[in-house]
Amino acid sequence: MIDNDRVSSLWKTIAVALIGIVATGASAWMVFDQNVVSREEVSRMIAIESDWRTEREVVLQVLGESKIMLKQVAEDVTKVKVEQARLTERVELLMKQEMVARQQGGKYSR
């Protein structure tokens, strides 16, 4: 059979463990959970205290202007590519004319 001292010791150990668990949970709550902001508080802070409401129009305007600028840059890049292709063709034509002129023993004439 189990000795009474052992049973008493077991209950004391369980009690100390439970007290330790409760103390750890309470201290963790005081350190971590006590200052946690709720969803409602965040929504209120965004609605009232945030500069987003006042700056929203400015941000949207800057985004619109950036979009227009990007379209213009894309058009300019396309124009540059077309000009590059035209100049490449012209250079190739001039190089062929130069080779033909050298093969014929004459000078290149424009």
Image: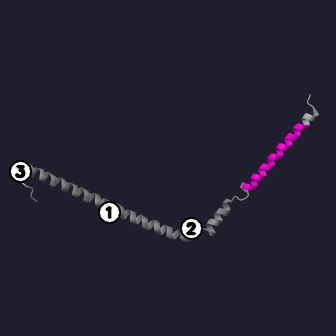
Taking 42 as reference, is 13 left or right? right
Which residue is labeled 2 in the image?
Answer: 52
Q: Does dot 3 land on a helix, a strand or a loop?
A: loop
Taking 75 as reference, is 5 left or right? right
Against 90, residue 52 (above or below) is below
Whole-number angstrom distance, CA of label 2 to CA of label 1 = 34 Å
Which residue is labeled 1 in the image?
Answer: 76
Which quarter of the figure is the N terminus placed in?
A: top right
Residue sitting farthest toward the left? 105
Callout 2 touching callout 1 (CB < 8 Å): no
Which numbered disc flags the more N-terminal residue, 1 or 3?
1
Q: The residue under label 1 is which amino acid type?
A: Asp
Which numbered disc flags the more N-terminal residue, 2 or 3?
2
Q: Does dot 2 land on a helix, a strand or a loop?
A: helix
Against 9, residue 88 (above or below) is below
Type of secondary structure dominating the magenta stretch: helix
Q: Nearer the viewer, mark 2 or mark 3?
A: 3
Mark 2 Cα within 10 Å, few/some/many (few <14, many 20+)? few
Callout 1 touching callout 3 (CB < 8 Å): no
Q: The residue under label 3 is which amino acid type?
A: Gly
Which numbered disc flags the more N-terminal residue, 2 or 1?
2
| x 85%, y 40%: residue | 13
| x 58%, y 69%: residue | 51
| Region rendered in magenta | 8-31
Q: Where is residue 109, by image quadrant?
A: bottom left
x and y percentages locating residue 50 in the rendered image: 60, 68
Q: What scheme was used to colour the molecule?
A: one colour
Which residue is labeled 3 in the image?
Answer: 105
Q: The residue under label 2 is which amino acid type?
A: Trp
| x 7%, y 55%: residue | 107
